Amino acid sequence: MSTRRLENIATHTLLIILALLFLFPFYILIHNALMTDPQMTGFDWIWFPSEPQWRNFVDLFADPLVPMANSFRNSALIAISLATCEILVAIMAGYALARIPHPSRNLIFGLLLSTLLIPGTGTLIPKYVMVAKMGMVNTPQGLVVPQMFSVFSAFMFRQYFLSFPRDLEDAGHVDGLGYWGVFWRIAFPNAWPVIIALGSLALINGWNDVLWPLLIGQKRTWWTVQISLSAYITAQVVVLRLAFAGALLGALPMLIIFLVLQRHIAQGYTRTGIKG
């Protein structure tokens, strides 16, 4: 057997092992979502339940103590609103940093980048104090507005617009368009690959966020999916079957979005490039 063939076999074997390792958590998620609590905590391992407990999903939404249906609606509302607002703010900031001349443009850009060195948890208390003083605790505004400013997204849009052909913008200026007109009529429509990539990332982050909704959405009416799931595993109550059923349903929307848009996400990130 040739050396090249041995290398191919070794490579494919390694890739298969890595794929199985990545897929194993999803198997556990599906496996436990279809079992009862005694089956999960028993000593005998069951590869797949002989009688899948589909009723777990019915009980999940019928539980009067945990508003799961309302939590899914809240998560969708917050994630979509956050992604939309974040992209609008970031694309305008990125275009301004790339195209609008200003003596302090590089200084402003450097200061913005320096904020990436601050851990997100380090700004939680100042943001919470501001939100509380503005009376936005337990409101959708409090859940969305403080989180919609992303320096990373603004940076990625800036890199994209630095590589954007100036000839198209110059043609817009010749036709009488200002920076605002060129942005909305020329730059924005051509930035859809980056918008889809960064919008998908913002949507996933908004859906999976736990700490900020835990601080701001203190009332049950504004619980998100992640907060509701934590209610099934506490010091007083442990309902594993509903926790896993909710986790499975909570993971599906973002998994579907990623699988559908993965090609566009990859294209969006490759188009940003690294420009000075």
Image (spheres, rainbow, N blue to C red):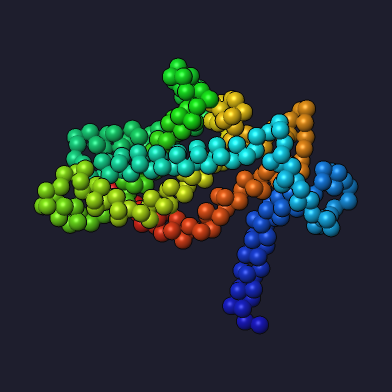
Q: Residue at x 43, y 31 (%)?
A: 145
What residue is drawn where x is 57% and y is 53%?
A: 255
- What is the x, y in percent for residue 36? 82, 46
Q: Position of residue 258 (x, y in %)?
A: 52, 54
Tell how many labels: 0
Q: Which quadrant of the figure has residue 218? A: top right
| Left or right, 158 with reference to 172 | right
Report whether 90 appears left or right of 73: left
Residue beneath the point at 46% across and 19% down: 135
Query: x, y (%) of residue 40?
Result: 82, 46
**Is 7 above or below relative to 104?**
below
Depicted 220 relative to depicted 96: above or below:
above
Residue 124 appears in view: no
Residue at 38% over, 50% down: 195
Q: Nearer the viewer, residue 235 or 221?
A: 221
The answer to whether residue 156 is seen in the rendering is yes
Instruction: Please identify the residue farthest to the bottom as the structure is shown.
Output: 1
Image: 150 above or below 177: above
Q: Quadrant of the N terminus?
A: bottom right
**Which residue is outermost to the right?**
43
